[in-house]
Image: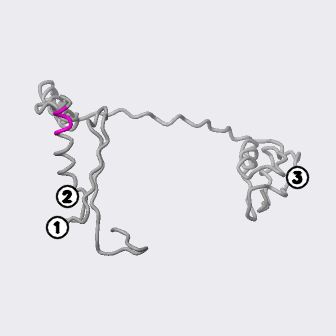
Amino acid sequence: QKAFRGKYGGERTASFVGLVPAEKPQYLVVIFIDEPSRVKYGGVIAAPVFKAVTSRVMAYHGSLPDPGALTPAQIKAQERAEARARARERKQGKEKTVLGEFRSELAPKKKMLPVRESGTVPDVVGQSVRRAVEMFARQGLVPVIKGKGARVVRQTPEAGVRWDSKDAAPESVLWLSEQE
């Protein structure tokens, strides 16, 4: 919509922006159509104008695309069809044919912390919640979090308390403060 005297009225502007050629752009073309009469959407009314203008510009500079050239989507479809044909030629037995393949990077494996059967309660007062939980986990303890906030202001059991596999791991509680 077009603004007039601080308000929006019924008038419109249709627009379309594009880069040509698509692979290695050399031109940025912006088409504005002021108050289109029938259709108000830029993709419908301004895009054909963009195509006509860019075709003329590219022809003038001698860089029109080859009309016989395949688009990336067409190339991919052609490669899939060729792969299917090769698979049919090599097909043996009653196994299913592989029609496509893709590679993906696997997420790096996270190091698993060994479960400890004994340990010492770490001192986490003043630490961030994340750091405190990591420190407890390294000792084989899973703390209960109480309160809201980002920093640990109190803990039980106190730092330095030892425990071993004969006893159950101590119940650990971390109290948080809302202050950074």
The amino acid pointed to by label 1 is Arg
Residue marked by disc 1 = 38
Which quarter of the figure has residue 105?
A: top left
Q: Which residue shows up at 75% across the image and 63% down it? A: 146
- Tag 1, which secondary structure? loop
Q: Secondary structure at mark 3?
A: loop
Label 3 CA crowd tier, 10 Å (few <14, some 14–19, many 20+): some
In this picture the colour scheme is: one colour
Please identify the quarter of the rendering in which residue 14 is found: bottom left
Residue 106 shown left or right of residue 113 in the figure: left
Amino acid at the residue labelled 3: Glu
Q: Report, in whole angstroms, how far the alpha carbon at label 3 lies from the one at label 1.
A: 77 Å
Instruction: Residue 42: say if magenta.
Output: no
Residue 68 visible somewhere in the drawing = yes
Looking at the rendering, the stretch of residues picked out in magenta corresponds to 56-60
| Marker disc for residue 27 | none
Report which residue position mark 3 lands on.
158
Residue kind at label 2, given as amino acid type: Ile
Residue named by callout 2: 45
Q: Horizontally, is 145 left or right of 77 in the view?
A: right
- For marks 2 and 3, give the CA distance: 73 Å
Work out whether 128 lies above or below 20.
below
